[in-house]
Image: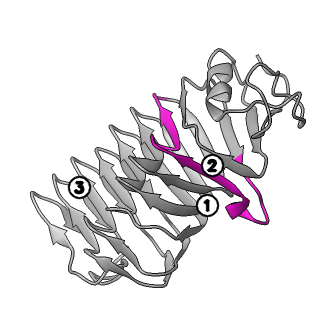
Amino acid sequence: MLTAARTYYVRTDGSDSNTGLSNTAGGAFKTLQRVAEIVVPIDFGGYTITVQLADGTYTDSAVFTKTLNGRVSIVGNASSPSNVVISTSASCITSSGAGTDVTVSKCQLQSSSVSALVATNGAYITGTDNIYGVCAFAHVAALLRGQVVITGTAQIIGNAPSFANLDNGFLDTTLVAFTLTGSRSFAAAFIYAGSLSYARVVLPTFTGSATGSRFTTAGNSMINVNGAGDSFLPGNAAGTRASGGEYA
């Protein structure tokens, strides 16, 4: 059991045979997945394990499972998030399993096959002050009772079928400052909520514009925009309500 907070370091010139406990080439890990493997048996004792990423591009994805009594906080570059790029074929960071709690902040995230951030099987994931590049499925996904919380700022610089895809999942973007740069498009919908999902989209702000449907809510799901109206979310096409889906 941890008796104090702990920091692991990840660098592009590190090695997964290192301890991960010092910010040097001879001490830091090379991959985030190595951190995910290391923390599984640890009882956090209520403390946070911080994962500090050095500047660079990381092409490995990571799946965090079975976090015990604490949170994993993955941190990029506070002043220049674009200096820390996680660019993967699988989802960049996945939080999986009830009780697993992961925060990802101040990074640029993009996936050629899936999503940037995923919460599934009852897990939590929080994205804070991140930049979202091109993703093949959605920038963030909440699946099978997974919960995704976006806080601070969210800069969208790449396209995806949806910013958020929920399938029996939960999304909260309360008070987030969204910036959409360039010609952004969402081929499915900016927010897609299906299978008893709930999206709380209360008082965010949006700078920039996009093409595509603003929302789809289906399968008795709910998108709550606090009465902001059908044209509130980014897009240039009307949203869709289907199969008991609600938007209000």
Q: Which residues are magenta?
A: 75-98
> Looking at the image, which residue is at 90% across and 35% down?
24
The kind of residue on which mark 3 rests is: Ser
Could you give the CA–CA distance between mark 1 and mark 2, rounded to whole angstroms? 8 Å
Residue receiving disc 1:
130
- Whichever of callouts 1 and 2 sits on the residue coming sooner in the sequence is 2
> Looking at the image, which residue is at 52% across and 79% down?
181
Up the image or down, 181 lies above or below 32; here it is below
In-front residue for pair 103/94: 94
Could you give the CA–CA distance between mark 2 and mark 3, rounded to whole angstroms? 26 Å
The numbered mark at residue 221 is 3
The kind of residue on which mark 2 rests is: Val
Q: Is residue 56 visible from the viewing direction of this image? A: yes
List x then y, in percent, for residue 156.
51, 69
The kind of residue on which mark 1 rests is: Asn
Badge 2 element: strand
Label 3 Cα crowd, 10 Å radius (few <14 / some 14-19 / many 20+)? many
The numbered mark at residue 104 is 2
Q: Is residue 114 left or right of residue 182?
A: left
Q: Nearer the viewer, mark 2 or mark 3?
A: 2
Q: Quadrant of the N terminus?
A: top right
